[in-house]
Image (cartoon, rainbow, N blue to C red):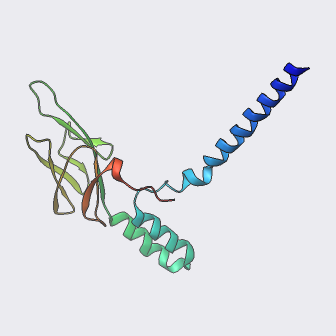
Amino acid sequence: MKYLFLALSLMLGLILSSVAVSNEYSSQKLLKNLFTTPYERQQLDNSRNSDGNESNIVNKALNHAASVDLKSIVYRKGKQPVIWVNESNTLKNKMVDSNIRVYGLDSKNIVRLKVNKKKIKMKPGQVWSEMDDQAIDKYRMKLVE
């Protein structure tokens, strides 16, 4: 009888702790970080709160606001390094997107890019947004809740 009581209280404790953990990681919190830049989130919130006439303006603004995610540099023996930017690479072409061109890499692993005719410098692991006009390390980005 004593062991049955201990087993039941242990099971009850496990059930209650799992419910608390599942509430903490609810899908509502995970969906808040679906869009990566604060500008995009603000524009989408504005479009939801306005009438349908402004939605075309918002969509155009989102399409023109460029963001660059410099993922990595792969050095190859006897060949040019491959630079990964926004899920694309420079293996065949220095143009990784219609508005992003990689045009240099120095000995300190600083990559020189041209985004919409604007020259920027970034290190691997940094993210640059046209709205903020600065490159920041990914691990320093603030999560919006």
Is residue 29 shown left or right of residue 104? right
Hey, which residue is sitting farthest right in the picture?
Answer: 1
Q: 52 or 80: which is nearer to us?
A: 80
**Residue 145 percent location from the top left of the image:** 52, 59
Q: 38 or 61: which is nearer to us?
A: 38
Q: Is residue 55 above or below residue 36?
A: below
Quadrant hosting residue 77: top left
Is residue 55 shown left or right of residue 113? right
Residue at horizontal 11%, vertical 29%? 79
Residue at horizontal 42%, vertical 56%? 36
Q: 82 or 94: which is nearer to us?
A: 82
Q: 138 or 111: which is nearer to us?
A: 138
Is residue 107 shown left or right of residue 66? left
Is residue 119 shown left or right of residue 29? left
Number of on-image labels: 0
Quadrant where the image shows the N terminus = top right
Q: Is residue 52 above or below residue 115?
A: below
**Residue 95 percent location from the top left of the image:** 20, 48
**Residue 54 percent location from the top left of the image:** 48, 78
Quadrant hosting residue 99: bottom left
